[in-house]
Image (cartoon, rainbow, N blue to C red):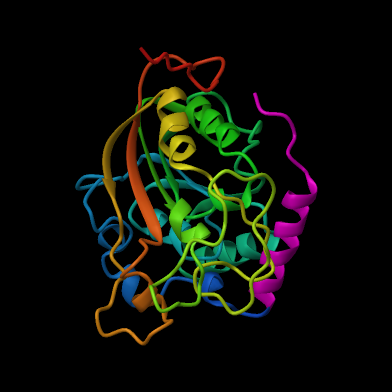
């Protein structure tokens, strides 16, 4: 089991997200009324969850804010939402109460969830939040532990390249200005649509995003890059930059096999 991650980064990001709720920033806006007309289609446009999730034990991981958890609850799942921000979780409780939905909120970090038993969930849905923890390995280990065999893990992450690339265009496009192999958080940003101002974010390499997931006991069944590119986007806009750099990757994985005790980088022998 992971050790307690109440690190300076954890505490910093909790305060940052609480402030974003107070400021009513874009990722703290609850689900719209229209999204509840067909909640499963709203949250699962790719159809990865099948025709129904009614009665499934579903964890929304790092997903506070009144958007994801209430929609999954409206679709019939037994929902628990984990987030480090008490203000984000309060939004979930407010939306659930207003719509007479049942869901459980837990204030915790996504890489340390000792309150959940082994095999407690059928589905784990994990919107973008892995960038706020220094290491992704403990996240995958915890998700593998609390999932039943055959369960689905659907996650979305910021791509490493997007976190490397400048938010401002040059004459050649959007240049890589951050090293791929790095320690510590990324430099602070101001006014970026690709990163959250005031948070500490960490770049996780492709080997970590995908390789460590496989080594934790998951088989990847699908991968998509959600399309945000706009050919007519204003230079420097989110849509324009997304023509050059995919901002996100979404993964569908299934829990298989026993828990692996260690997740060390494999040794590759070259002939």
Q: Give above or below for 203 relative to 187.
A: above
Q: Give above or below for 19 relative to 40.
A: below
Q: Give above or below for 60 relative to 258.
A: below
User: Where does the image place residue 193, in percent across and percent down from the top left?
Assistant: 50, 74
Extreme-right residue of the structure: 8
Q: Give above or below for 222 relative to 102.
A: above
Towards the viewer: 33 or 24:
24
| Residue occupying the point 29% across, 72% down | 229
Towards the viewer: 206 or 88:
206
- As for residue 21 lying within the magenta part, the answer is yes
Q: Main secondary structure of the magenta part?
A: helix
| Viewport quadrant of the C terminus | top left
User: Where does the image place residue 137, in percent across and percent down from the top left?
Assistant: 56, 32
User: Where does the image place residue 159, in percent across and percent down from the top left?
Assistant: 43, 53
Towards the viewer: 13 or 147:
13
Report the side of 140 relative to 238 (left or right). Answer: right
| The quadrant where residue 58 appears | top left
């Amino acid at each position: 089991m992971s050790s307690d991650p109440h690190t300076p980064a954890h505490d910093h990001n909790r305060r940052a997200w609480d402030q974003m709720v107070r400021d009513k920033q874009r990722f703290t806006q609850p689900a719209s009324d229209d999204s509840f007309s067909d909640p499963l289609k709203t949250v699962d446009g790719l159809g990865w969850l099948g025709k129904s999730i009614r009665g499934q034990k579903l964890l929304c991981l790092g997903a506070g804010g009144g958007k994801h958890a209430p929609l999954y609850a409206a679709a019939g799942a037994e929902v628990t939402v984990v987030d480090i921000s008490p203000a984000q979780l309060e939004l979930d409780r407010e939306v659930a109460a207003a719509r007479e939905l049942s869901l459980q909120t837990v204030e915790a970090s996504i890489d340390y969830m000792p309150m959940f038993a082994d095999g407690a969930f059928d589905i784990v849905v994990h919107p973008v939040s892995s960038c706020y923890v220094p290491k992704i390995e403990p996240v995958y280990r915890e998700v593998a532990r609390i999932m039943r065999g055959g369960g689905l893990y659907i996650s979305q992450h910021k791509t490493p390249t997007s976190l490397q690339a400048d938010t401002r265009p040059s004459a050649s496009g959007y240049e890589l200005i951050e090293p791929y192999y790095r320690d510590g958080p990324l430099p602070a940003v101001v006014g970026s649509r690709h990163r959250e101002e005031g948070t500490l974010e960490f770049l996780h390499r492709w080997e970590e995003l995908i390789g460590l997931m496989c080594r934790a006991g998951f088989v990847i069944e699908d991968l998509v890059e959600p399309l945000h590119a706009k050919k007519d986007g204003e230079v420097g806009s989110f849509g324009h930059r997304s023509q050059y750099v995919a901002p996100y990757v979404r993964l569908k994985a299934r829990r298989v096999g026993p828990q692996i005790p260690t997740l060390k980088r494999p040794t590759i022998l070259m002939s």
